[in-house]
Structures are given as structure tokens and as C-alpha cells.
Image (spheres, helix red, strand yellow):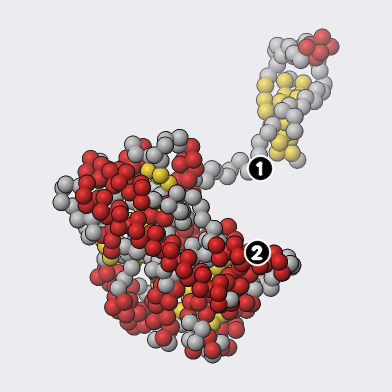
Amino acid sequence: MASSVFSLASATPSASLSSHDIEKGKLNLRNTSLCFKKEKNNPFMKTKSFGRISMVVASNVSRFEGITMAPPDPILGVSEAFKADNHELKLNLGVGAYRTEELQPYVLDVVKKADKLLLEKGENREYLPIEGLAAFNKVTADLLFGADNPVIKQQRVATVQGLSGTGSLRLAAALIERYFPRGEVLISSPTWGNHKNIFNDAKVPWSEYRYYDPKTVGLDFEGMIADIKAAPEGSFILLHGCAHNPTGIDPTPEQWEIIADVIQEKNHIPFFDIAYQGFASGSLDADAASVRMFVARGMEVIAAQSYSKNLGLYAERIGAINVVCSSPDAAARVKSQLKRIARPMYSNPPVHGARIVANIVGDAALFKEWNAEMEMMAGRIKNVRHKLFDSLSSKDKSGKDWSFVLKQIGMFSFTGLNKAQCDNMTNKWHVYMTKDGRISLAGLSLAKCEYLADAIIDSYHNVS
């Protein structure tokens, strides 16, 4: 649209309008009055009247003028800031993505082999069914619950392939909003930053239960239990199955039993987010123990899965939502409604990553190789965790106890640093991290542990 369009009408001598003035783009407006009005049928057109001369001006006013600028994502924005920094010692410990010792992205060898096999087979690119690839749905439920689990054999699990963990959680949130109108979700304080966004977007009310104890940099177990007990009966309790994000603090097996006791007593529904199965400890079975314990008690359970971390399929967006029901009939109905929700949301999920997962798990040799690579990745992070602890302990002469670093598990460590201290980490030391004090050990190398320890010690002791 042009910036201005003029319409002239009813010129009078008093306006002193000449052809020369028009050619030069000037108007003599002596003895005239000025007023503005919007054209009746065009919100982009304004009429300017000068006595008996009127000009219609088109202005570039957007219909979207009322939309405000969204704030940057607190996690993904860290990477953007990191890229803009040219300092040679800079570290990106913000995003939860695995890196090699050379701090480079890593594609699993087993994924490369599965990719090659798919290429050789010449698989088509047809649409998947709404619920996803059948072979994927079978193996993902088997991996989480155990292939011999009665809930699998009795067909009491509704499994639908989702868009990684985020999309799977979003499907479950929509199910809660639609069929549990008074349902409320309890989430840990703190939790993964996107959990709140997901439930807000689905219009599902949520509140928090205590989880992190800043005094011990550990689990506030008593506070957690008290808050779950105090929640309205029938609430959905969102639990991190393993490697809690962002703290890296998990309940002990004995504490998990007590959590399950309270949830059963209050008739709550456990809702697991499983983003790190096999990636936390290096064992698929060990990292699924909490979920399997709840299921073994006969409880109905919701569980979201992701293959971004344990197979490095970040961009493939592969995951699943599983709902364990009390009967096969209930599972069938739940699955039908999950499909109904997915249809207008994204219609059907991506096929490539689903085939990779199905082929790796379905092939004994590839499955064995995957387990070995998971142990390697988990082992590298454990080594980095120990080296960081050793560096902190040897460099800090204050007597502070840094053992919480070793008690945490998975790719993250919660440092206990506040926002001002995190700002110092970035501004002075060029260490990029989220402002809640979380660092991703997956983005740290053994060679950089001492540098990071210096940054943490300086920020902790010299910035309040």
C-alpha cells in the first residue's frame, strides 16, 4: 500500500490551489480549517478536509497492531546469546543436548546404521495413522513398562505416538481439560520450564508442590509429601520418572514407595514425564523403575516419553503418550479420544524417527549397540560430574560442601546459584546457563571443569 493517496474535491478560490502547486506537491491552505475522519468502509483510509478541499490519506496501520512482542524463550535464548559471544573460553550449559568431549553434537552410531537400513529398504513417505507407527507404539510401551508386564498383555495401555515429549504432554493436557473439567495438575517447584506453558496453553489449572530445598541443595521430601496430601482428591501429580529437570535430584526407591502410598490414599492420578530413560543411569530398566512400581500397584497412570536424549533424535520429534487403564475397554476409549484430539492439532506424527526407534529396538544386535552407547553417554556425564566436584572441592578453601553435585543424576546439575550469581557467570566468565542456576553437564568437557569451578566459586562467594 502506498504511504499516501490524495483525493481532491470542491476546490474554491480561497484555497489558492493552482496547477503549479499540484505539480510541485504543495497546497496553499490559507483561511482553511483542518479536520480528520476515517473513511466509513475502510479503516486504513483517513479523510483530511481543508475547508471545501478534502484529501483521503491511506495509512499503514496493521490489523495486528494490538499484538505485543513475546518475550524470548528463557532456554533457547541462552543459545542465541552464546552464539553472539566471541570469547574463546565461552561455555554453553543452557540447552539439554548431549555433546562429545570436544563439545560437538553427537549422532549415535546405531542411529546411523538404522538410517542406512531404512534408505536401503526404500521406505515410502506416506501418512501415518493418527496414532502413529504401530511398530513404534508397541516397542515404546514395551520399553517403558516391560514387554512381559500384565498391562501390556491385557491390552490396558493406550499408546499414541506424539511430537516428542512436549507434544505428548500436550495431548495428555488436552485430554485432562476435556474429560476432567475440575482436574488440577500439581507440578514440582522447580520444574522444566515448558511444563507451565503446556498446561496454560491447554487451559488446565496447575499448582506447585515443594521439591527443591535450597538449604541442602537436595530434595524437600517432607514438603513434597505434605503438598501432595493437601491437594484436592483426584488431582494429577506430575512426576519426573528419572533425572529430575532442572535439579537432577531424584527420590530414593524408598521415597518413591511413600510417594505412591500418598497418591493412592488421595486417589490422585500419577502423571509421569519420562524424558531420559536409559540416559540417566545408562540402564533402560533402572530408569523406568518408578513408573513400573506405580503400575505394579494397580494404579492408572499417564506417562509421556521422549527419544530426544537417549537416541539423540532431537529434531525428529519422536515420543509417545501412554495411558494405563483399569480395563482394555477403557484403554480403547482413551486411545480413540487421544486420536480425536491429535487430528485437528497436527493430524498425524512424523514417520522417520519412529522407524528408527522401531528398527533399533526390534533388532537384537542394534538394541545391544544402543544400550552400549547409552552407557557411554551416561558414563561421560558421570565422569564430568565427578571431575567438577573434585575441582570445586580442591579449589574452594571455604569449607563449603559441594557433595550435592555427586548426589544429583542425569545431564543437569542444580548449582544453587541465584539470578545475580548466574548473571556473573555469563557476564564475567562467559558461561551461559538458565537463570535458575541449572547447568547442563552434557555440554561440559573434562578439560573445562576447572574453568567452570573457578566461575562457580567466584560467583557463589563474591556475588550476593
Residue positioned 56% across, 83% down in the render: 331
Residue positioned 46% across, 56% down in the render: 98
Q: Secondary structure at mark 2?
A: helix
The residue wearing badge 1 is 63
Q: Nearer the viewer, residue 440 or 8?
A: 440
Q: Secondary structure at mark 1?
A: loop
Numbered badge on residue 116: 2
Is residue 286 placed above or below 419 in the rendered structure? below
The first of marks 1 and 2 along the sequence is 1
Q: Is residue 362 visible?
A: yes
- Residue 68 coordinates in the image, percent (x, y): 54, 43
Numbered badge on residue 80: none
Q: Nearer the viewer, residue 399 or 190?
A: 399
Q: Amino acid at mark 2?
A: Lys
Residue positioned 52% across, 64% down in the render: 311
Residue positioned 22% across, 46% down in the render: 395
Q: Quadrant of the C terminus?
A: top left
Cα distance, mark 1 to mark 2?
49 Å
- Residue 18 coordinates in the image, percent (x, y): 82, 10
Q: Amino acid at mark 1?
A: Arg
Q: Quadrant of the N terminus?
A: top right
Is residue 142 placed above or below 42 in the rendered structure? below
Is residue 36 placed above or below 156 in the rendered structure? above
